[in-house]
Image (cartoon, rainbow, N blue to C red):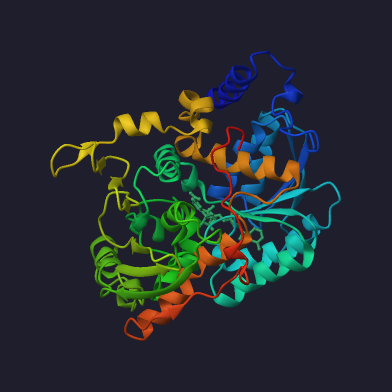
């Protein structure tokens, strides 16, 4: 916490060259923008708490209201707010719909939603209707109807929604985006991405500790196992596409000059969760008899209007190191980058037919945000990316402009879930993406991601 506070302070001072009074630390980027905003949080479980901590670091934010149906989470959040020396917010959570009383408050400008997936669209729609600038966790929606609900509500109300995809702010992701924009790879052809992360210890627990123990879920589990695991039982779909797709969709100018056209998806058999339950809880545990619908590895191939392809993988039910498996390929070269492997081949630069390390490329194309907040950002949550995503939400809201990742992105990226489900159910049948922009993708210019403020 102290380190993060120091980071904000140092980086701002470094950026402005002067020492500033605390309330001006995040001074407005433009004359028109508000200097301070009030934020309400709905859902302060593990993720909501990350967001709360990022918000409490900022002198341009007041957390005026929090809502969670779990009173333990409210207590923990109130402690964190008091420890940060901030005023006590109004609290909500008497029932599942008490969040609507938070939305009725006049002193809430921005709402951050970090609840289970089935609540996302309902809460975001209500939030936009209440005129609140809305930050929504990933994935945004579960069905095509929900995707349209988000878009229609934004268009009816004029209120903005930002999908809080933090991976878009990873240092290597932003550097590669910079390289794509600088034409290092030439004209783009193909991308690989996905979510490969052993979630067995998240999907099951003993009802007391969030990670790694026990084989309970639903009412007998806690944290994500309470709600996330049911999706594996009931849906054969890529239920978590945006950590991979978000970054490459931006590189491919999706919704801004290009768009996702169609996909085809296939799933392997489902064995990982059953094996885990048997080995951890025993063959006689009642959960060992369950029939999991979700295939262990789901592969979707998307084609875009500009003739590019994107392979998205969902692979979370077996042993696998954390990997989003990024690959970007153009007519001039190719890069593969993950947390541990970063390699590139650029024609005319890389010798022979092998790979070279990406180190010097990542340095050369380091993103202005990372150059500015650099070293110290690494000390913030998830290696800095949680800070950057909340920073983008707050700064866009202060300016009252559309966020970098908007409601159309939320809809298009999240649509992979229902479309992959339909494709798998029909032996890989091609599914068309709706054009959530209603044709506007043709004239919309790419967002300027290369700024150093957000
Ligand atoms: N971007 C990331 O890196 C990242 C990481 C983790 C989770 N997430 C996303 O964040 C969201 C939340 O995940 P989590 O790990 O915090 O789960 P969690 O189960 O720890 O927290 C969810 C919270 O929502 C509360 N809640 C449920 N229904 C509610 C209602 N009607 N009103 C008010 N509160 C309600 C629960 O009591 C709980 O505290 C999910 O969408 C998840 O996919 C994103």
Q: Total number of numbered labels? A: 0
Where is residue 242? Give x, y as percent: 47, 58
Tell me which residue sits at (31%, 70%) in the image: 285
Residue that protrudes farthest toward the bottom in the picture: 426
Residue that protrudes farthest toward the left in the picture: 352
Q: Can the viewer see residue 47 in this picture?
A: yes
Where is residue 287? Give x, y as percent: 35, 72
Q: Can the viewer see residue 76 in this picture?
A: no
Quadrant position of ligand 1? bottom right
Where is residue 342? Give x, y as percent: 28, 40
Q: Which quarter of the figure is the N terminus placed in?
A: top right
Say left or right for 244 vs 336.
right
Residue that protrudes farthest toward the right in the picture: 106
Vertical relation: 267 (above or below) 212: below
Vertical relation: 419 (above or below) 250: below
> Between residues 169 and 198, which one lies in front from this camera angle?
169
Residue that protrudes farthest toward the front in the picture: 348
Q: Which quarter of the figure is the C terminus placed in?
A: top right
Tell me which residue sits at (69%, 44%) in the image: 396
Vertical relation: 312 (above or below) 392: below
Tell me which residue sits at (46%, 47%) in the image: 167
> Between residues 337 and 382, which one lies in front from this camera angle?
337
Q: Quadrant of residue 56?
A: top right
Where is residue 16? Give x, y as percent: 65, 19
């Amino acid at each position: 916490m102290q380190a993060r506070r120091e980071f904000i302070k140092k980086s701002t001072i470094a950026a402005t060259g002067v020492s500033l009074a605390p309330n001006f630390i995040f001074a407005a980027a433009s004359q028109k923008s508000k200097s301070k905003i009030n934020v309400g949080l709905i859902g302060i479980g593990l993720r909501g708490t990350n967001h709360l901590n990022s918000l409490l670091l900022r002198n341009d934010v007041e957390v005026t209201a929090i809502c969670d149906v779990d009173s333990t989470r409210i207590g923990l959040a109130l402690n964190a707010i008091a420890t940060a020396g901030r005023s006590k917010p109004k609290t909500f959570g008497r029932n599942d719909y008490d969040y609507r009383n938070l939305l009725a408050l006049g002193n809430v400008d921005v709402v951050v939603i970090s609840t289970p997936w089935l609540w996302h669209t309902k809460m975001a729609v209500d939030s936009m209707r209440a005129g609140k600038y809305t930050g929504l966790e990933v994935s945004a929606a579960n069905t095509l109807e929900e995707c349209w609900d988000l878009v229609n509500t934004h268009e009816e109300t004029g209120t903005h929604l930002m999908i809080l995809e933090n991976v878009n702010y990873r240092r290597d992701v932003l550097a590669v985006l910079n390289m794509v924009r600088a034409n290092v790879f030439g004209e783009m052809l193909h991308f690989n991405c996905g979510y490969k992360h052993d979630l067995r210890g998240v999907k099951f627990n003993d009802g007391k500790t969030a990670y790694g123990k026990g084989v309970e879920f639903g009412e007998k589990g806690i944290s994500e196992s309470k709600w996330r695991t049911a999706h594996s039982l009931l849906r054969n779909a890529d239920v978590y596409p945006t950590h991979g797709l978000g970054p490459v969709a931006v590189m491919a100018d999706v919704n801004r000059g290009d768009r996702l056209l169609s996909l085809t998806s296939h799933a392997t058999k489902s064995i990982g969760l059953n094996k885990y339950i048997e080995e951890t809880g025993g063959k006689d545990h009642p959960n060992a008899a369950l029939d999991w619908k979700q295939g262990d590895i789901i592969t979707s191939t998307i084609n875009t209007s500009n003739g590019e392809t994107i392979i998205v993988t969902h692979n979370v039910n077996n042993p696998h190191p954390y990997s989003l498996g990024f690959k970007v390929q153009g007519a001039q070269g190719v890069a593969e980058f993950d947390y541990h492997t970063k390699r590139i081949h650029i024609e005319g630069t890389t010798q022979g037919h092998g790979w070279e390390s990406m180190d010097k490329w990542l340095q050369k194309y380091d993103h202005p945000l990372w150059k500015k907040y650099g070293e110290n950002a690494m000390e913030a949550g998830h290696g800095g990316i949680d800070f950057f995503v909340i920073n983008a939400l707050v700064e866009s809201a202060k300016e009252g402009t559309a966020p970098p990742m908007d409601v159309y992105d939320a809809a298009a990226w999240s649509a992979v879930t229902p479309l992959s489900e339909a494709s798998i159910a029909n032996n890989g049948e091609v599914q068309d993406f709706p054009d959530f922009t209603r044709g506007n993708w043709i004239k919309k210019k790419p967002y300027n991601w290369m700024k150093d403020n957000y």
